Amino acid sequence: SQTIHQWPATLVQPVGSPLSLECTVEGTSNPNLYWYRQAAGRGLQLLFYSVGIGQISSEVPQNLSASRPQDRQFILSSKKLLLSDSGFYLCAWSVEGASPLHFGNGTRLTVT
Amino acid sequence: ELKVEQNPLFLSMQEGKNYTIYCNYSTTSDRLYWYRQDPGKSLESLFVLLSNGAVKQEGRLMASLDTKARLSTLHITAAVHDLSATYFCAVDDLNTPLVFGKGTRLSVIA
């Protein structure tokens, strides 16, 4: 069966520090991968998605970036965090066609 | 641009009552998804609706899709406290990632 791992679960970082969140998927090949962010009490904002290794689409211009170095690995990064980067970050995967997204457990990031 | 609107955004209902959450969207897509999110947790897939007239039921929840009206409903029957959560609908179009509504925060009270 397919599983998705996302870590860390919580993170507290000072403003201006770098960020690296990692997500891996097991049990499927060539998944579509996504990073969403959810601000406190708000809806989901799509940040990045990828349909294959090295293929990244950015939905919102900001100080975040994403990379997909391997088929089932998706990384969210920042060189310098802003206070506004605080939120709940969710990684998700899907397969081609009419398929729901399957979410990881999320990372709660607090930038202080 | 694909837009998804849910209403109401907040819903407080008594145990045992029925209610409906509405999800309107702006595209001609026939692929709609419902998710549940418990406080502090991730999203869990509830229903996948893939055609006009599709109806899915799980326990006290029933979801339906009317693609001509671009409307999906999530009906809650005889609510119980365990249904308290935030419910999201999401729509995708060909080659477009899922777009989520803002969510409906449901609170079931005794």
Image (tube, rainbow, N blue to C red):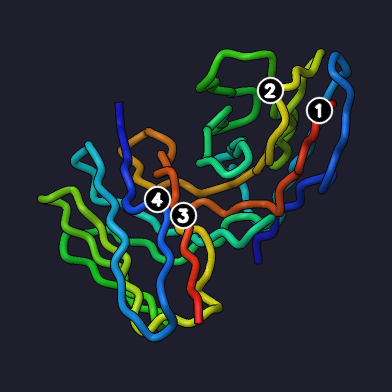
In the rendered image of this protein, does residue B96 appear above or below residue A63? below
Q: Amino acid at mark 4?
A: Leu
Q: Check if mark 2's residue and mark 1's residue have beta carbons within 8 Å.
A: yes
Q: Specify few, some or many for label 3: CA neighbours under 10 Å numbering under 14, 14-19, or 20 or more.
A: many
Q: Chain of mark 2?
A: A
Viewer-side label of 1, 4? 4
| Residue in view at x 52 percent, y 69 percent | B84
Most foreground residue, B7 or A50: B7
Q: Position of residue B40 (x, y in %)?
A: 69, 55
Sequence-wise, which precedes: disc 2 or disc 3?
2
Q: Position of residue A2 (x, y in %)?
A: 65, 61
Query: What chain is tagged by disc 4?
Result: B
**Nearer mark to the viewer, of 1 and 3:** 1
Which amino acid, mark 3?
Pro
Q: CA distance from mark 1 to mark 4?
A: 27 Å
Spatial CA span between label 2 and label 4: 23 Å
Q: Residues within 10 Å of mark 2 (few under 14, many from 20)?
A: few
Q: Position of residue A109 (x, y in %)?
A: 78, 36
Q: Secondary structure at mark 1?
A: strand
Residue on which the image places disc 3: A100
Residue pointed to by mark 4: B9
Q: Chain of mark 3?
A: A
Q: Residues within 10 Å of mark 1 (few under 14, many from 20)?
A: some
Q: Earlier in the sequence, mark 2 or mark 1?
A: 2
Residues at marks 3 and 4, CA–CA distance in whole angstroms: 22 Å
Q: Which residue is mark 1?
A: A111
Hey, which quadrant is residue A73 in on the image? top right
Dot 3 and dot 4 within a common chain: no
- Mark toward the viewer: 3 or 4: 4
